[in-house]
Amino acid sequence: MKDNDLKADVSSFGFATNAVRAGHKRTNENEHSEPIFTTSSFVFSSAAEAAARFSGEEAGNIYSRFTNPTVRAFEQRLASLEGAECCVATASGMSAITATILGLLKTGDHIVSSRSIFGTTTVLLSNIIAGLGIETTFVELSDLAAWEKAIRPETRLLFLETPSNPLGELVDIAALSEIAHKHGCLLAVDNCLCTPALQQPLKLGADIVIHSATKYIDGQGRCMGGAVCGTNDVVGGGVFGFLRSAGPTMSAFNAWVFLKGLETLSLRMSAHSAAAMELAEWLEKQTEVKTVYYPGLQSHPQHALAKLQQSGFGGVVSFELQGGKEESWRLIDNTRLLSITANLGDAKTTITHPATTTHGRLTPEQRAEAGISDSLIRVAVGLEDINDIKADLLRGMR
């Protein structure tokens, strides 16, 4: 079977095969690797063909703001991995969330969101989206009764991260999807920390899966990008319509980088998960550490749920030190190997202090509600030797 025949047959292949092959339609140049189409526009054979393309009567490339072959290859590949009908690639993870909300909701609609989400997402919902007349109610991620109680007649969307960043909290996706659908709402899951290699929310009943491709999909901290996966009606309609007009577009070059990242995604997520598990177990034994947050640990209150809906536990480990901000900053500053940066999903291990970085724009009350203490440190475990990572953290502790 040739690569340009794969689109119709991806369901017959395994995850690893689709991660390498899906979405590539070989051109007349017979290239082996996916080409990068660095062009702003596309040429038509006639005025009639141009009119047919713009009207939607004829499929084909028009303008790279919303139709580009390299971006489309990435979209089709990620859709195949998530089990989605459709994927829309965007310029960043935050633009993917924005495109979902503004493409599907209107003034007067209501969102119910977990309060255990990325700090910038909280700011987006509380300040920018609220300013457009779309209100958000925040609830405890794992409390299904709280989710249902918060739903109103005007509620259109339930939004969450599972596992959450940075505390690794979870919700039962299948149970929450039943609640959402009973009330006529869409369920959107940010799958950034697991990726489809470890969790596939659509198969558990979610309607929309959102990604920051900047993180694990890239895998080496090179490019910005996002994606929204779901049905042709929801994602291919409202979300794509927003992208076409508003233009939070993924570049062809970035899409090519993400295509290459997907090829090794399964291998990397397995390695990240194994190293994170070893680090979490080691941290639990250190007297300087008060609490470790990692769903792979037996001590995690939702460990059984993580085993049920995930095939691995991911690469993010957070922990609280004995003490406060001074002790946490001292540990971070004394590391020599780990990169002090707020990004995650990199081959290089990163370390950050969430209360003053990723969640620094929240009010003290919002941070307290989200469980972000001054003693909390987040480590996104990379692909270095795990003993070197331990030694670097120990240098900061003692």
Image (cartoon, helix red, strand yellow):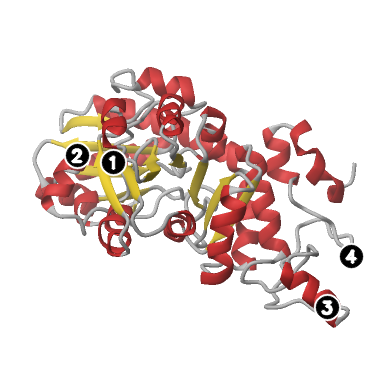
Q: In terms of depth relative to the viewer, which is nearer, 263 or 303?
A: 303
State which mark lies toward you, 2 or 4: 2
State which mark lies toward you, 4 or 1: 1
Give the spatial CA distance, label 1 vs label 3. Answer: 48 Å
Q: Which residue is mark 4?
A: 29
Whether residues under marks 1 and 2 lie with C-beta atoms below 8 angstroms apart, the answer is yes
Nearer the N terminus, badge 2 or badge 4?
Answer: 4
Location of the C terminus by quadrant is top left
Q: Quadrant of residue 51?
A: bottom right
Give the spatial CA distance, label 1 vs label 2. Answer: 8 Å
- Residue found at x 45% / y 37%: 184
Q: Is residue 156 above or below residue 100?
A: above
Say what secondary structure mark 3 lies in. loop
Q: Quadrant of residue 28?
A: bottom right
Nearer the N terminus, badge 4 or badge 1?
Answer: 4
- Residue found at x 64% / y 48%: 232
State which mark lies toward you, 1 or 3: 3
Q: Which residue is mark 2?
A: 371
Residue type pointed to by label 1: Ser
Whether residues under marks 2 and 4 lie with C-beta atoms below 8 angstroms apart, the answer is no
Whether residues under marks 4 and 3 lie with C-beta atoms below 8 angstroms apart, the answer is no
Say what secondary structure mark 4 lies in. loop
Q: Which residue is mark 1?
A: 116
Q: Which residue is mark 3?
A: 44
Q: Is residue 133 above or below residue 184?
A: below
Nearer the N terminus, badge 4 or badge 3?
Answer: 4
